[in-house]
Image (cartoon, rainbow, N blue to C red):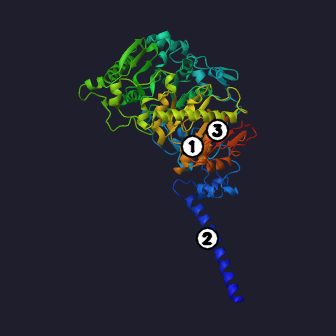
Amino acid sequence: MKQKNEQIHTTKLLTYLLIVLIGVLGLVCLYYGSSFAPGSRRSDDTASRLDGSDPVFGGFSRNGDLVDLLDEQGYYPEVPKSIPICDMKYSELIPCLDRNLIYQLKLKPNLAVMEHYERHCPPPERRYNCLIPPPKGYKIPIRWPASRDEVWKANIPHTHLAEEKSDQHWMVVDGEKIKFPGGGTHFHDGADKYIVGLAQMLKFPGDKLHNGGSIRNVLDVGCGVASFGAYLLPLDIIAMSLAPNDVHENQIQFALERGIPSTLGVLGTKRLPYPSRSFELAHCSRCRIDWLQRDGILLLELDRLLRPGGYFVYSSPEAYEQDPENRKIWNAMYSLLKRMCWKVVVKRGQTVIWAKPLSNSCYLKRDPGTRPLLCSSGDDPDASWNVSMKACITPYSAKMHKERSSGLLPWPQRFTAAPPRLEEIGVSAEEFLEDTKIWHFRVIEYWKQMKVVVKKNSIRNVMDMNSNLGGFAAALKDKDVWVMNVAPVKMSARLKIVYDRGLIGTVHDWCEAFSTYPRTYDLLHAWAVFSEIEERGCSAEDLLIEMDRILRPDGFVVIRDKHSVINYIQKFITALHWDGWSSEVEPRTDALSSGEERVLIAKKKLWTDGFMTM
Protein backbone atom coordinates (compact mmCIF):
# COMPACT_ATOMS: atom_id res chain seq x y z
CA MET A 1 0.00 0.00 0.00
CA LYS A 2 2.92 2.34 0.89
CA GLN A 3 4.57 1.69 -2.49
CA LYS A 4 1.27 2.40 -4.26
CA ASN A 5 0.89 5.74 -2.44
CA GLU A 6 4.44 6.69 -3.39
CA GLN A 7 3.68 5.91 -7.03
CA ILE A 8 0.52 8.07 -6.92
CA HIS A 9 2.50 10.93 -5.30
CA THR A 10 5.23 10.64 -7.94
CA THR A 11 2.64 10.62 -10.74
CA LYS A 12 0.96 13.77 -9.37
CA LEU A 13 4.32 15.53 -9.01
CA LEU A 14 5.27 14.69 -12.61
CA THR A 15 1.84 15.89 -13.76
CA TYR A 16 2.27 19.24 -11.98
CA LEU A 17 5.79 19.65 -13.42
CA LEU A 18 4.49 18.83 -16.90
CA ILE A 19 1.69 21.43 -16.59
CA VAL A 20 4.18 24.10 -15.46
CA LEU A 21 6.55 23.18 -18.31
CA ILE A 22 3.73 23.39 -20.88
CA GLY A 23 2.71 26.79 -19.47
CA VAL A 24 6.25 28.14 -19.72
CA LEU A 25 6.72 26.77 -23.24
CA GLY A 26 3.34 28.29 -24.22
CA LEU A 27 4.43 31.75 -23.09
CA VAL A 28 7.75 31.41 -24.88
CA CYS A 29 6.04 30.32 -28.10
CA LEU A 30 3.48 33.12 -27.80
CA TYR A 31 6.25 35.68 -27.35
CA TYR A 32 8.68 34.50 -30.03
CA GLY A 33 5.96 33.44 -32.43
CA SER A 34 4.44 36.90 -32.41
CA SER A 35 7.88 38.49 -32.75
CA PHE A 36 8.08 37.11 -36.27
CA ALA A 37 4.44 37.74 -37.17
CA PRO A 38 3.49 40.03 -40.08
CA GLY A 39 3.99 43.68 -39.16
CA SER A 40 6.48 42.92 -36.39
CA ARG A 41 9.71 44.87 -36.31
CA ARG A 42 11.79 42.41 -34.25
CA SER A 43 14.69 40.50 -35.76
CA ASP A 44 18.22 39.57 -34.72
CA ASP A 45 19.40 42.78 -36.35
CA THR A 46 16.84 44.85 -34.46
CA ALA A 47 17.76 43.14 -31.21
CA SER A 48 21.40 44.14 -31.70
CA ARG A 49 20.30 47.77 -32.26
CA LEU A 50 18.40 47.70 -28.98
CA ASP A 51 21.68 46.74 -27.34
CA GLY A 52 23.04 50.08 -28.50
CA SER A 53 25.03 49.22 -31.64
CA ASP A 54 22.84 51.50 -33.82
CA PRO A 55 20.93 54.17 -31.89
CA VAL A 56 19.57 55.89 -35.00
CA PHE A 57 17.80 53.31 -37.17
CA GLY A 58 15.45 50.56 -36.12
CA GLY A 59 12.71 50.41 -33.52
CA PHE A 60 11.29 48.73 -30.47
CA SER A 61 8.84 45.86 -30.55
CA ARG A 62 6.59 44.07 -28.15
CA ASN A 63 3.87 41.49 -28.09
CA GLY A 64 0.58 43.03 -27.00
CA ASP A 65 -0.96 39.75 -25.77
CA LEU A 66 2.07 38.93 -23.65
CA VAL A 67 2.12 42.43 -22.16
CA ASP A 68 -1.56 42.17 -21.27
CA LEU A 69 -1.00 38.72 -19.78
CA LEU A 70 1.90 39.88 -17.61
CA ASP A 71 0.45 43.30 -16.88
CA GLU A 72 -0.43 42.52 -13.26
CA GLN A 73 3.14 41.38 -12.59
CA GLY A 74 4.55 44.63 -13.98
CA TYR A 75 6.80 42.63 -16.32
CA TYR A 76 7.59 44.50 -19.57
CA PRO A 77 10.70 42.84 -21.01
CA GLU A 78 11.17 45.25 -23.94
CA VAL A 79 10.30 48.66 -22.55
CA PRO A 80 13.55 50.69 -22.58
CA LYS A 81 14.77 52.64 -19.59
CA SER A 82 15.97 55.31 -22.01
CA ILE A 83 15.73 56.15 -25.69
CA PRO A 84 18.82 57.44 -27.51
CA ILE A 85 18.88 61.05 -28.67
CA CYS A 86 19.71 61.65 -32.33
CA ASP A 87 22.71 63.58 -33.51
CA MET A 88 22.15 67.33 -33.73
CA LYS A 89 22.28 67.12 -37.54
CA TYR A 90 18.81 65.54 -37.38
CA SER A 91 17.28 68.43 -35.39
CA GLU A 92 14.99 69.38 -38.32
CA LEU A 93 14.32 65.88 -39.64
CA ILE A 94 11.05 65.19 -41.49
CA PRO A 95 11.32 61.42 -42.07
CA CYS A 96 8.96 61.18 -45.07
CA LEU A 97 10.28 64.35 -46.72
CA ASP A 98 13.97 63.63 -46.30
CA ARG A 99 15.67 64.16 -49.66
CA ASN A 100 18.78 62.39 -48.39
CA LEU A 101 16.64 59.26 -48.18
CA ILE A 102 15.71 59.60 -51.85
CA TYR A 103 19.38 59.49 -52.77
CA GLN A 104 20.22 56.70 -50.30
CA LEU A 105 17.41 54.48 -51.59
CA LYS A 106 18.36 55.37 -55.18
CA LEU A 107 14.83 56.49 -56.02
CA LYS A 108 14.33 58.29 -59.29
CA PRO A 109 11.52 60.84 -58.83
CA ASN A 110 10.40 62.92 -61.80
CA LEU A 111 11.74 66.38 -60.95
CA ALA A 112 9.64 68.04 -63.66
CA VAL A 113 6.41 67.18 -61.85
CA MET A 114 7.72 67.77 -58.29
CA GLU A 115 7.78 64.12 -57.24
CA HIS A 116 10.91 64.79 -55.16
CA TYR A 117 8.84 67.08 -52.91
CA GLU A 118 6.20 64.40 -52.29
CA ARG A 119 6.24 61.87 -49.44
CA HIS A 120 8.82 59.08 -49.57
CA CYS A 121 8.85 57.30 -46.21
CA PRO A 122 11.75 55.19 -44.93
CA PRO A 123 11.23 51.41 -44.87
CA PRO A 124 10.91 49.82 -41.41
CA GLU A 125 14.60 48.96 -41.16
CA ARG A 126 15.56 52.61 -41.72
CA ARG A 127 13.13 54.24 -39.32
CA TYR A 128 14.70 56.50 -36.73
CA ASN A 129 14.99 54.97 -33.30
CA CYS A 130 16.02 58.12 -31.45
CA LEU A 131 14.56 61.36 -30.14
CA ILE A 132 15.02 64.51 -32.23
CA PRO A 133 16.94 67.18 -30.27
CA PRO A 134 16.16 70.90 -30.44
CA PRO A 135 18.80 73.24 -31.92
CA LYS A 136 21.36 74.75 -29.59
CA GLY A 137 19.94 77.64 -27.60
CA TYR A 138 16.31 76.64 -28.20
CA LYS A 139 13.77 78.63 -26.18
CA ILE A 140 10.11 78.12 -25.38
CA PRO A 141 8.37 79.78 -28.36
CA ILE A 142 7.01 83.31 -28.09
CA ARG A 143 3.32 82.98 -27.36
CA TRP A 144 0.40 83.93 -29.54
CA PRO A 145 -0.63 86.60 -30.50
CA ALA A 146 2.83 88.18 -30.18
CA SER A 147 4.28 85.23 -32.15
CA ARG A 148 2.46 86.36 -35.29
CA ASP A 149 5.02 89.13 -35.63
CA GLU A 150 8.21 87.69 -34.11
CA VAL A 151 9.94 84.40 -33.21
CA TRP A 152 13.22 83.41 -31.56
CA LYS A 153 16.00 83.12 -34.10
CA ALA A 154 17.59 80.29 -32.08
CA ASN A 155 14.51 78.12 -32.63
CA ILE A 156 14.81 78.37 -36.43
CA PRO A 157 18.39 79.52 -37.06
CA HIS A 158 17.91 80.24 -40.76
CA THR A 159 18.16 83.73 -42.18
CA HIS A 160 18.48 83.03 -45.90
CA LEU A 161 14.81 83.86 -46.52
CA ALA A 162 15.28 87.26 -44.86
CA GLU A 163 18.19 87.95 -47.18
CA GLU A 164 16.61 86.54 -50.33
CA LYS A 165 13.24 88.25 -49.80
CA SER A 166 14.55 91.48 -48.26
CA ASP A 167 12.81 93.61 -50.91
CA GLN A 168 9.48 91.79 -50.33
CA HIS A 169 9.27 92.27 -46.54
CA TRP A 170 8.73 88.60 -45.69
CA MET A 171 10.92 88.70 -42.59
CA VAL A 172 13.66 90.74 -40.93
CA VAL A 173 16.44 89.63 -38.58
CA ASP A 174 16.50 91.79 -35.44
CA GLY A 175 19.03 90.66 -32.84
CA GLU A 176 17.83 87.45 -31.17
CA LYS A 177 14.53 87.59 -33.02
CA ILE A 178 13.19 87.25 -36.54
CA LYS A 179 10.31 89.64 -37.22
CA PHE A 180 7.52 89.48 -39.78
CA PRO A 181 6.25 92.85 -41.06
CA GLY A 182 3.36 91.22 -42.94
CA GLY A 183 4.67 91.66 -46.46
CA GLY A 184 4.76 89.23 -49.35
CA THR A 185 5.78 88.82 -52.95
CA HIS A 186 2.65 90.52 -54.24
CA PHE A 187 1.61 92.63 -51.26
CA HIS A 188 4.43 95.05 -50.53
CA ASP A 189 2.11 97.30 -48.49
CA GLY A 190 1.14 94.45 -46.18
CA ALA A 191 -1.15 91.43 -46.29
CA ASP A 192 -3.91 93.29 -44.45
CA LYS A 193 -4.23 95.95 -47.16
CA TYR A 194 -4.00 93.29 -49.87
CA ILE A 195 -6.90 91.38 -48.30
CA VAL A 196 -9.03 94.53 -48.16
CA GLY A 197 -8.21 95.07 -51.83
CA LEU A 198 -9.51 91.61 -52.73
CA ALA A 199 -12.76 92.27 -50.86
CA GLN A 200 -13.14 95.55 -52.75
CA MET A 201 -12.60 93.78 -56.07
CA LEU A 202 -15.38 91.34 -55.16
CA LYS A 203 -17.57 94.20 -53.86
CA PHE A 204 -18.16 92.45 -50.55
CA PRO A 205 -19.99 94.46 -47.83
CA GLY A 206 -17.73 96.56 -45.64
CA ASP A 207 -14.68 95.47 -47.65
CA LYS A 208 -14.61 92.30 -45.52
CA LEU A 209 -13.39 89.21 -47.34
CA HIS A 210 -15.48 86.89 -45.17
CA ASN A 211 -18.58 88.22 -46.99
CA GLY A 212 -20.96 87.79 -44.09
CA GLY A 213 -19.52 84.41 -43.14
CA SER A 214 -19.90 82.80 -46.57
CA ILE A 215 -16.10 82.56 -46.95
CA ARG A 216 -14.52 80.62 -44.11
CA ASN A 217 -12.06 78.01 -45.47
CA VAL A 218 -9.20 79.20 -47.72
CA LEU A 219 -6.39 77.28 -49.41
CA ASP A 220 -3.25 79.40 -49.80
CA VAL A 221 -0.96 77.67 -52.29
CA GLY A 222 2.73 78.64 -52.21
CA CYS A 223 2.10 80.59 -49.01
CA GLY A 224 5.62 81.74 -48.11
CA VAL A 225 5.74 82.36 -44.35
CA ALA A 226 1.90 82.45 -44.27
CA SER A 227 1.37 86.16 -43.63
CA PHE A 228 -1.73 86.04 -45.87
CA GLY A 229 -3.24 83.39 -43.60
CA ALA A 230 -2.14 85.28 -40.48
CA TYR A 231 -4.07 88.40 -41.47
CA LEU A 232 -7.17 86.40 -42.43
CA LEU A 233 -7.60 85.12 -38.87
CA PRO A 234 -9.08 88.39 -37.47
CA LEU A 235 -11.77 88.08 -40.16
CA ASP A 236 -12.82 84.64 -38.87
CA ILE A 237 -11.30 83.07 -41.98
CA ILE A 238 -8.99 80.09 -41.54
CA ALA A 239 -6.48 79.27 -44.26
CA MET A 240 -4.68 76.03 -44.91
CA SER A 241 -1.36 77.64 -45.85
CA LEU A 242 0.49 75.18 -48.07
CA ALA A 243 4.06 75.09 -49.37
CA PRO A 244 6.63 72.39 -50.15
CA ASN A 245 9.92 71.77 -48.40
CA ASP A 246 11.70 73.29 -51.43
CA VAL A 247 14.56 75.77 -51.87
CA HIS A 248 12.69 77.98 -49.37
CA GLU A 249 12.77 74.97 -47.07
CA ASN A 250 11.96 76.67 -43.76
CA GLN A 251 8.94 78.77 -44.78
CA ILE A 252 6.36 76.44 -43.23
CA GLN A 253 8.58 75.97 -40.19
CA PHE A 254 8.46 79.73 -39.65
CA ALA A 255 4.69 79.75 -40.19
CA LEU A 256 4.09 77.09 -37.54
CA GLU A 257 6.52 78.72 -35.13
CA ARG A 258 4.42 81.87 -35.53
CA GLY A 259 1.27 79.91 -34.62
CA ILE A 260 -0.37 80.17 -38.05
CA PRO A 261 -2.32 77.20 -39.50
CA SER A 262 -0.07 75.73 -42.17
CA THR A 263 1.34 72.48 -43.51
CA LEU A 264 3.88 71.00 -45.89
CA GLY A 265 2.51 69.88 -49.24
CA VAL A 266 2.97 70.17 -52.97
CA LEU A 267 0.86 70.13 -56.10
CA GLY A 268 2.80 67.34 -57.77
CA THR A 269 1.36 64.01 -58.90
CA LYS A 270 -0.85 63.10 -55.93
CA ARG A 271 -4.11 64.64 -54.79
CA LEU A 272 -3.79 66.94 -51.80
CA PRO A 273 -5.00 65.06 -48.67
CA TYR A 274 -8.29 66.97 -48.40
CA PRO A 275 -11.83 65.95 -49.42
CA SER A 276 -13.70 67.48 -52.34
CA ARG A 277 -15.51 70.78 -51.90
CA SER A 278 -13.49 71.84 -48.84
CA PHE A 279 -12.62 75.47 -49.58
CA GLU A 280 -14.54 78.60 -50.53
CA LEU A 281 -11.44 80.31 -51.90
CA ALA A 282 -8.05 79.24 -53.27
CA HIS A 283 -5.22 81.77 -53.45
CA CYS A 284 -2.00 81.86 -55.48
CA SER A 285 0.06 85.03 -55.23
CA ARG A 286 3.10 84.56 -57.48
CA CYS A 287 3.28 80.96 -56.29
CA ARG A 288 5.52 79.82 -59.15
CA ILE A 289 3.21 77.02 -60.23
CA ASP A 290 2.87 75.96 -63.85
CA TRP A 291 -0.91 75.69 -63.93
CA LEU A 292 -0.95 74.66 -67.59
CA GLN A 293 1.16 71.52 -67.29
CA ARG A 294 -0.27 68.07 -68.04
CA ASP A 295 -3.55 69.33 -69.52
CA GLY A 296 -4.19 71.63 -66.58
CA ILE A 297 -4.16 68.83 -64.02
CA LEU A 298 -3.19 71.17 -61.16
CA LEU A 299 -6.09 73.54 -61.86
CA LEU A 300 -8.37 70.52 -61.99
CA GLU A 301 -7.14 69.57 -58.51
CA LEU A 302 -8.16 73.02 -57.30
CA ASP A 303 -11.50 72.48 -59.02
CA ARG A 304 -11.97 69.28 -56.99
CA LEU A 305 -11.24 71.15 -53.75
CA LEU A 306 -13.38 74.26 -54.33
CA ARG A 307 -17.00 74.43 -53.26
CA PRO A 308 -19.73 75.39 -55.77
CA GLY A 309 -19.19 79.03 -56.67
CA GLY A 310 -15.77 79.02 -54.98
CA TYR A 311 -13.18 81.62 -55.97
CA PHE A 312 -9.65 81.29 -57.31
CA VAL A 313 -7.48 84.38 -56.76
CA TYR A 314 -4.42 84.44 -59.01
CA SER A 315 -1.88 87.23 -59.13
CA SER A 316 1.55 87.84 -60.61
CA PRO A 317 3.94 90.80 -60.35
CA GLU A 318 2.98 93.98 -62.19
CA ALA A 319 6.33 93.97 -63.94
CA TYR A 320 5.19 90.93 -65.94
CA GLU A 321 2.12 92.65 -67.39
CA GLN A 322 3.71 93.57 -70.72
CA ASP A 323 5.97 90.51 -70.92
CA PRO A 324 5.07 88.52 -74.10
CA GLU A 325 5.62 85.13 -72.44
CA ASN A 326 3.47 86.12 -69.48
CA ARG A 327 0.63 87.30 -71.76
CA LYS A 328 0.81 83.98 -73.59
CA ILE A 329 0.38 82.14 -70.27
CA TRP A 330 -2.56 84.36 -69.34
CA ASN A 331 -4.32 83.65 -72.63
CA ALA A 332 -3.79 79.90 -72.26
CA MET A 333 -5.16 79.96 -68.70
CA TYR A 334 -8.24 81.90 -69.85
CA SER A 335 -8.89 79.28 -72.52
CA LEU A 336 -8.48 76.35 -70.15
CA LEU A 337 -10.59 77.82 -67.36
CA LYS A 338 -13.35 78.75 -69.80
CA ARG A 339 -13.53 75.11 -70.89
CA MET A 340 -13.70 74.20 -67.17
CA CYS A 341 -16.75 76.51 -66.96
CA TRP A 342 -15.02 78.93 -64.59
CA LYS A 343 -15.92 82.59 -65.11
CA VAL A 344 -13.87 85.74 -64.58
CA VAL A 345 -15.47 87.69 -61.73
CA VAL A 346 -13.07 90.63 -61.82
CA LYS A 347 -9.59 91.54 -63.06
CA ARG A 348 -7.43 94.38 -61.83
CA GLY A 349 -3.87 94.74 -63.09
CA GLN A 350 -2.11 91.42 -62.60
CA THR A 351 -4.75 90.03 -60.24
CA VAL A 352 -7.72 88.06 -61.56
CA ILE A 353 -10.47 86.27 -59.63
CA TRP A 354 -12.31 83.34 -61.19
CA ALA A 355 -15.41 81.58 -59.87
CA LYS A 356 -16.26 77.89 -60.15
CA PRO A 357 -19.77 77.10 -61.52
CA LEU A 358 -22.63 76.53 -59.10
CA SER A 359 -24.11 73.57 -60.95
CA ASN A 360 -23.55 71.07 -63.78
CA SER A 361 -25.46 73.18 -66.32
CA CYS A 362 -22.41 74.56 -68.11
CA TYR A 363 -20.74 71.13 -68.31
CA LEU A 364 -23.84 69.72 -70.01
CA LYS A 365 -23.75 72.45 -72.66
CA ARG A 366 -20.13 71.84 -73.73
CA ASP A 367 -19.43 70.37 -77.16
CA PRO A 368 -18.89 66.58 -77.11
CA GLY A 369 -15.23 65.68 -76.56
CA THR A 370 -14.36 69.03 -75.00
CA ARG A 371 -11.34 68.76 -72.72
CA PRO A 372 -10.96 68.49 -69.85
CA LEU A 373 -13.42 65.61 -69.82
CA LEU A 374 -15.76 64.94 -66.91
CA CYS A 375 -14.52 62.32 -64.44
CA SER A 376 -16.17 58.90 -64.62
CA SER A 377 -19.05 58.13 -62.29
CA GLY A 378 -16.86 55.56 -60.51
CA ASP A 379 -14.30 58.17 -59.40
CA ASP A 380 -14.49 59.08 -55.71
CA PRO A 381 -13.62 62.78 -55.46
CA ASP A 382 -13.11 62.46 -51.69
CA ALA A 383 -10.42 59.75 -51.96
CA SER A 384 -7.20 61.64 -51.31
CA TRP A 385 -4.58 59.54 -49.51
CA ASN A 386 -1.89 58.49 -51.97
CA VAL A 387 -4.32 58.92 -54.89
CA SER A 388 -2.98 60.19 -58.21
CA MET A 389 -4.41 63.41 -59.59
CA LYS A 390 -6.70 63.06 -62.57
CA ALA A 391 -7.03 65.44 -65.51
CA CYS A 392 -10.82 65.52 -65.41
CA ILE A 393 -13.59 67.67 -63.96
CA THR A 394 -15.49 66.36 -60.96
CA PRO A 395 -19.19 67.05 -61.68
CA TYR A 396 -21.67 67.60 -58.89
CA SER A 397 -23.98 64.83 -57.78
CA ALA A 398 -27.59 64.99 -58.95
CA LYS A 399 -28.64 66.33 -55.57
CA MET A 400 -25.88 68.96 -55.47
CA HIS A 401 -26.75 70.06 -59.00
CA LYS A 402 -30.37 70.45 -58.00
CA GLU A 403 -29.52 72.45 -54.87
CA ARG A 404 -27.12 74.66 -56.85
CA SER A 405 -25.04 75.27 -53.74
CA SER A 406 -23.22 73.54 -50.90
CA GLY A 407 -26.19 73.99 -48.57
CA LEU A 408 -23.98 75.30 -45.76
CA LEU A 409 -24.91 78.03 -43.30
CA PRO A 410 -22.59 81.04 -42.98
CA TRP A 411 -19.92 81.09 -40.30
CA PRO A 412 -20.27 80.78 -37.32
CA GLN A 413 -23.66 79.03 -37.61
CA ARG A 414 -22.11 76.19 -39.62
CA PHE A 415 -19.79 75.45 -36.70
CA THR A 416 -22.49 73.61 -34.76
CA ALA A 417 -25.17 72.98 -37.40
CA ALA A 418 -25.47 69.47 -38.87
CA PRO A 419 -24.11 69.71 -42.46
CA PRO A 420 -25.92 68.11 -45.44
CA ARG A 421 -23.05 65.72 -46.23
CA LEU A 422 -23.64 63.77 -43.00
CA GLU A 423 -25.97 61.44 -44.88
CA GLU A 424 -23.07 60.52 -47.22
CA ILE A 425 -21.26 58.93 -44.27
CA GLY A 426 -24.36 57.44 -42.67
CA VAL A 427 -24.50 59.74 -39.64
CA SER A 428 -27.74 61.34 -38.49
CA ALA A 429 -28.10 64.94 -37.35
CA GLU A 430 -28.94 63.64 -33.86
CA GLU A 431 -25.71 61.59 -33.71
CA PHE A 432 -23.73 64.63 -34.88
CA LEU A 433 -25.20 66.85 -32.15
CA GLU A 434 -24.62 64.14 -29.54
CA ASP A 435 -20.99 63.83 -30.63
CA THR A 436 -20.53 67.60 -30.22
CA LYS A 437 -22.05 67.48 -26.74
CA ILE A 438 -19.87 64.56 -25.62
CA TRP A 439 -16.64 66.18 -26.77
CA HIS A 440 -17.61 69.43 -25.08
CA PHE A 441 -17.83 67.54 -21.78
CA ARG A 442 -14.67 65.53 -22.43
CA VAL A 443 -12.58 68.64 -23.14
CA ILE A 444 -13.86 70.32 -19.97
CA GLU A 445 -12.60 67.29 -18.03
CA TYR A 446 -9.20 67.42 -19.79
CA TRP A 447 -8.81 71.08 -18.88
CA LYS A 448 -9.73 70.43 -15.26
CA GLN A 449 -6.85 67.97 -15.07
CA MET A 450 -4.41 70.31 -16.78
CA LYS A 451 -5.36 73.65 -15.22
CA VAL A 452 -2.69 73.43 -12.51
CA VAL A 453 0.11 73.32 -15.10
CA VAL A 454 -1.20 75.09 -18.22
CA LYS A 455 0.11 78.64 -18.45
CA LYS A 456 -1.78 81.44 -20.16
CA ASN A 457 -1.42 81.37 -23.96
CA SER A 458 0.92 78.36 -23.69
CA ILE A 459 -1.15 76.30 -26.16
CA ARG A 460 -1.66 77.55 -29.72
CA ASN A 461 -0.98 74.77 -32.28
CA VAL A 462 -3.17 71.74 -31.53
CA MET A 463 -3.47 68.42 -33.36
CA ASP A 464 -6.37 65.99 -33.02
CA MET A 465 -4.89 62.73 -34.30
CA ASN A 466 -8.31 61.08 -34.77
CA SER A 467 -10.71 63.89 -35.56
CA ASN A 468 -13.89 61.89 -36.30
CA LEU A 469 -16.55 64.61 -36.83
CA GLY A 470 -14.45 67.47 -35.45
CA GLY A 471 -16.05 67.44 -32.01
CA PHE A 472 -12.78 67.83 -30.10
CA ALA A 473 -11.81 70.90 -32.14
CA ALA A 474 -15.31 72.36 -31.79
CA ALA A 475 -15.03 72.07 -28.01
CA LEU A 476 -11.99 74.36 -28.11
CA LYS A 477 -13.87 77.22 -29.79
CA ASP A 478 -13.42 79.53 -26.79
CA LYS A 479 -9.66 78.93 -26.63
CA ASP A 480 -7.28 81.02 -28.75
CA VAL A 481 -6.01 77.94 -30.59
CA TRP A 482 -6.27 76.33 -34.00
CA VAL A 483 -6.59 72.59 -34.58
CA MET A 484 -5.16 70.38 -37.29
CA ASN A 485 -7.87 67.72 -37.51
CA VAL A 486 -6.28 64.49 -38.71
CA ALA A 487 -8.51 61.78 -40.16
CA PRO A 488 -6.91 58.31 -40.18
CA VAL A 489 -7.14 56.77 -43.65
CA LYS A 490 -9.97 54.38 -42.87
CA MET A 491 -12.02 57.31 -41.47
CA SER A 492 -11.04 59.78 -44.21
CA ALA A 493 -14.64 60.16 -45.47
CA ARG A 494 -15.47 61.99 -42.24
CA LEU A 495 -13.00 64.79 -42.94
CA LYS A 496 -15.55 66.44 -45.24
CA ILE A 497 -17.70 67.05 -42.16
CA VAL A 498 -14.77 68.76 -40.44
CA TYR A 499 -14.45 71.16 -43.38
CA ASP A 500 -18.20 71.70 -43.60
CA ARG A 501 -18.06 72.88 -39.98
CA GLY A 502 -15.52 75.55 -40.99
CA LEU A 503 -12.51 73.71 -39.55
CA ILE A 504 -9.41 72.41 -41.33
CA GLY A 505 -7.59 69.09 -41.36
CA THR A 506 -5.84 66.41 -43.36
CA VAL A 507 -5.86 62.67 -43.99
CA HIS A 508 -2.95 60.65 -42.61
CA ASP A 509 -1.80 57.10 -41.92
CA TRP A 510 -0.32 56.96 -38.40
CA CYS A 511 1.81 53.96 -39.35
CA GLU A 512 3.97 56.63 -41.04
CA ALA A 513 5.55 59.92 -39.97
CA PHE A 514 3.52 63.11 -40.32
CA SER A 515 4.60 65.78 -42.82
CA THR A 516 5.69 68.51 -40.46
CA TYR A 517 8.86 69.86 -38.90
CA PRO A 518 9.96 68.85 -35.42
CA ARG A 519 8.58 70.89 -32.49
CA THR A 520 5.51 72.32 -34.23
CA TYR A 521 2.55 71.43 -31.96
CA ASP A 522 1.78 72.43 -28.37
CA LEU A 523 -0.82 69.71 -27.75
CA LEU A 524 -1.45 66.31 -29.33
CA HIS A 525 -4.75 64.54 -28.71
CA ALA A 526 -4.81 60.82 -29.51
CA TRP A 527 -8.17 59.11 -29.07
CA ALA A 528 -7.98 55.35 -29.81
CA VAL A 529 -5.10 55.98 -32.23
CA PHE A 530 -2.77 53.42 -30.66
CA SER A 531 -5.44 50.72 -30.65
CA GLU A 532 -6.10 51.36 -34.34
CA ILE A 533 -2.51 51.11 -35.52
CA GLU A 534 -1.74 48.07 -33.38
CA GLU A 535 -4.71 46.24 -34.91
CA ARG A 536 -2.91 46.77 -38.22
CA GLY A 537 0.41 45.45 -36.90
CA CYS A 538 2.13 48.83 -36.66
CA SER A 539 4.45 49.89 -33.88
CA ALA A 540 3.17 51.88 -30.90
CA GLU A 541 6.75 52.74 -30.03
CA ASP A 542 7.36 54.26 -33.46
CA LEU A 543 4.29 56.42 -32.96
CA LEU A 544 5.44 57.58 -29.53
CA ILE A 545 8.80 58.64 -30.98
CA GLU A 546 6.98 60.41 -33.84
CA MET A 547 4.72 62.23 -31.40
CA ASP A 548 7.77 63.37 -29.48
CA ARG A 549 9.30 64.66 -32.72
CA ILE A 550 6.40 66.97 -33.52
CA LEU A 551 5.65 68.02 -29.92
CA ARG A 552 7.17 71.24 -28.62
CA PRO A 553 9.07 71.22 -25.32
CA ASP A 554 6.63 72.12 -22.54
CA GLY A 555 3.87 70.72 -24.77
CA PHE A 556 1.21 68.19 -23.74
CA VAL A 557 -0.05 64.84 -24.98
CA VAL A 558 -3.60 63.70 -24.17
CA ILE A 559 -3.92 59.99 -24.89
CA ARG A 560 -7.31 58.32 -24.51
CA ASP A 561 -7.30 54.58 -25.13
CA LYS A 562 -7.99 51.18 -23.63
CA HIS A 563 -6.53 50.29 -20.25
CA SER A 564 -3.76 47.98 -21.50
CA VAL A 565 -2.52 50.58 -24.02
CA ILE A 566 -2.27 53.31 -21.39
CA ASN A 567 -0.47 50.92 -19.00
CA TYR A 568 2.09 50.20 -21.68
CA ILE A 569 2.60 53.84 -22.72
CA GLN A 570 3.13 54.79 -19.06
CA LYS A 571 6.32 52.72 -19.13
CA PHE A 572 7.77 55.05 -21.79
CA ILE A 573 7.04 58.37 -20.07
CA THR A 574 10.47 58.74 -18.47
CA ALA A 575 12.37 57.46 -21.52
CA LEU A 576 10.58 60.05 -23.69
CA HIS A 577 11.21 62.84 -21.14
CA TRP A 578 7.45 63.35 -20.90
CA ASP A 579 7.65 63.31 -17.12
CA GLY A 580 7.52 67.07 -16.60
CA TRP A 581 4.02 66.41 -15.25
CA SER A 582 1.49 63.66 -15.80
CA SER A 583 -1.99 62.58 -14.80
CA GLU A 584 -3.93 59.39 -15.40
CA VAL A 585 -7.64 58.96 -14.76
CA GLU A 586 -10.50 56.67 -15.67
CA PRO A 587 -13.05 58.86 -17.48
CA ARG A 588 -16.80 58.57 -17.29
CA THR A 589 -18.42 56.22 -19.77
CA ASP A 590 -20.33 57.90 -22.59
CA ALA A 591 -21.86 57.01 -25.96
CA LEU A 592 -18.46 57.19 -27.68
CA SER A 593 -16.67 54.93 -25.19
CA SER A 594 -15.55 51.59 -26.58
CA GLY A 595 -15.04 49.38 -23.59
CA GLU A 596 -12.81 50.35 -20.69
CA GLU A 597 -10.84 53.55 -21.36
CA ARG A 598 -8.26 55.60 -19.51
CA VAL A 599 -6.90 59.09 -20.13
CA LEU A 600 -3.19 59.85 -19.80
CA ILE A 601 -2.01 63.46 -19.94
CA ALA A 602 1.72 64.15 -19.90
CA LYS A 603 3.96 67.19 -20.33
CA LYS A 604 7.21 67.13 -22.28
CA LYS A 605 10.28 68.55 -20.57
CA LEU A 606 12.36 71.33 -22.04
CA TRP A 607 15.63 69.68 -22.89
CA THR A 608 18.87 71.15 -21.60
CA ASP A 609 22.50 70.77 -22.60
CA GLY A 610 22.65 67.96 -20.07
CA PHE A 611 20.88 65.59 -22.47
CA MET A 612 23.48 63.63 -24.41
CA THR A 613 23.06 62.96 -28.13
CA MET A 614 24.12 59.79 -29.90
Secondary structure, mark 3, is strand
Q: Nearer the viewer, mark 1 or mark 3?
A: 1
Mark identifier at residue 527:
none
Q: The disc labelled 2 sits on which kind of residue? A: Ile
x, y percent for residue 310: 41, 22
- Nearer to the camera, 416 or 128: 416
- For the residues labelled 3 and 2, the Cα–Cα distance comes to 42 Å
- Tell me if residue 549 comes above or below residue 475 in the rendering: below
Q: Could you say where residue 85 lies in the image, as x and y percent from the top left?
A: 68, 43
Image quadrant where one finds the N terminus: bottom right
Instruction: Work out how far the residue at label 1 is from the one at label 3, CA to CA, in angstroms.
Output: 19 Å
Say which label, 3 or 2, has the lower sequence index: 2
The amino acid on which the numbered mark 3 sits, given as a three-letter code, is: Val
The residue that mark 2 highlights is 22
Instruction: Determine which residue is flagged by label 3.
Output: 557
Q: Do we see residue 518 in this rendering?
A: no
- The residue labelled by disc 1 is 593
Q: Position of residue 239 (x, y in %)?
A: 52, 24
Q: Secondary structure at mark 1?
A: loop
The span from disc 2 to disc 1 (Cα, nearest Å) is: 38 Å
Label 2 crowd bin: few (<14), some (14–19), many (20+), radius 10 Å: few
Q: Residue at x 29, y 23 (%)?
A: 361
User: Which residue ends up furthest to the left in the rendered image?
Assistant: 368
Q: Residue at x 42, y 33 (%)?
A: 113
> Which of the pair 370/232 is nearer the observer?
232
Q: Does residue 39 show up?
A: yes
Secondary structure under the numbered disc 2 in the rendered image: helix
Q: Amino acid at mark 1?
A: Ser
